Image (cartoon, rainbow, N blue to C red):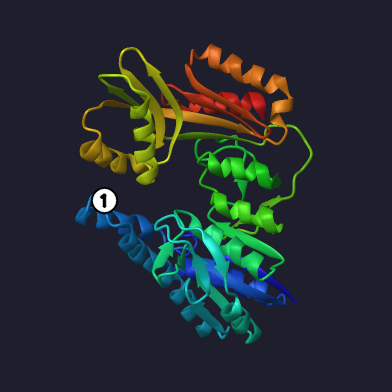
Amino acid sequence: MDTIVLKFGGSSVADNLKLNVVAKKIIDFYNENNKIVVVVSAQGKTTDKLIKEAKELSNIPNDREMDVLLSTGEQISMSKLSILLNRLDYKSISLTGWQAGIYTNSLNQNAKIENIDTTRIITELNNDNIVIVAGFQGINEKSDITTLGRGGSDTTAVAIAAAINAKHCYIFSDVDGVYTTDPNKITIAKKLETLSYEEMLEIANEGAKVLHNRCIEVGQKYNIPIITKSTFNNKQGTTIQEKIEDTKVKSIVKNDDIIYVSMRYETYSPEIFNRLVDLLLKKQIGANYFQNYSNHYTNINFAIKSTVLDKFQNLLEDELKSFETTYTNISRVSIIGHGIMNDDSILEKIMKIVELNQLEILNLEINESKIAILFSKKLSNNILEQLHKTLI
């Protein structure tokens, strides 16, 4: 008898009709003589709705209280699914993050799992229960609820799979695998049968909303095969596993959720740059691609995610009023494939498209699995399509 973990995303559990589809999937796996742990996200757009309502009360809500609030979404999903399975005569029990023994560090809104006490999960599995765990959440040393960041239910699922030595971890959503690029933007995108952990991690880190990046790190560390599939069909999905020795472009990710910040101070001093970086770190405002130069002034440019713009603007008002600050919406395009830096022809083809479209590059980054380009403006999907046709 194998133990497997099944994770269902928000679109999969969005309403009672879809919960019935999910229940059928679970029952099919259970009837194949598997022990099953299910991890669920909040229903539909519940998390977005809760964030919006909280921001109507406070522009920058308290992080601890946001964790308490947002964790309720997954608890609703787990209890509804357990109610349904029990009605269908399949023994089931739902567990919150803390009931499932998921212990994290103390970082609210983006906590990391430090340990999982599997005692309760194993006990319930041995009692022939289907165990349903609320994803995205855990508990810290103060017994406070913590959340793992958006998409964190993926990490919950893979971490549990590693802790209980599960054979596979299935990630179910409304798409049937990982594609060469966003199929909602480029209709010629192709589904990939396999990806290495390194390639999938690059795709996730570059902003593709496919898998939570930390779940891939956990999968790689403990060698847990991750299979992404659709809840709503039985098509073959994409398997993320050990490295595959080939050199070709697997995926192209265009991230438009980036804001380029230009800051200027009336005098120049290296300490000004140091202070700014320190403030960004303390406020948990992730920034990249710093440029610091002087021309009798202090000029600092960097990029941030659009999701932290409110935090950054609040920091400006509180502690950085002396800076002149402007914003530009820009794009970062990442071409991903293991061994990509060993084939010079790939970069040559990319640069031809850049020249043809008269695009300005702010930053170029190349490593073993990725060529990432930061552009000076927001790019159209036409550029993405040109790259896809040329490279894939």
Which of the image's four quarters has the C terminus? top right
Q: Is residue 281 left or right of residue 93?
A: left
Q: Position of residue 11 (x, y in %)?
A: 47, 58
Helix, strand or loop at label 1? It is loop
Q: Is residue 122 left or right of residue 268?
A: right
User: Is residue 124 at all visible to an observer of this figure?
Assistant: yes
Picture coordinates of residue 161 (x, y %)?
A: 64, 66
Foreground pick, 218 / 26: 218
Vertical placement of residue 318 versus 380, above or below:
below
User: In the depicted view, which residue is nearer to us: 5 or 160?
Assistant: 160
Quarter occupied by the N terminus: bottom right
Q: Position of residue 16 (x, y in %)?
A: 43, 70
Is residue 92 placed above or below 62 in the rendered structure? below
Residue that carries the numbered disc 1 in the rendered image: 60
Q: Considering depth in this image, is 317 or 42 the residue closer to the camera?
A: 317
Which residue is located at x 54 percent, y 67 percent? Answer: 39
- Type of the residue with mark 1: Ile
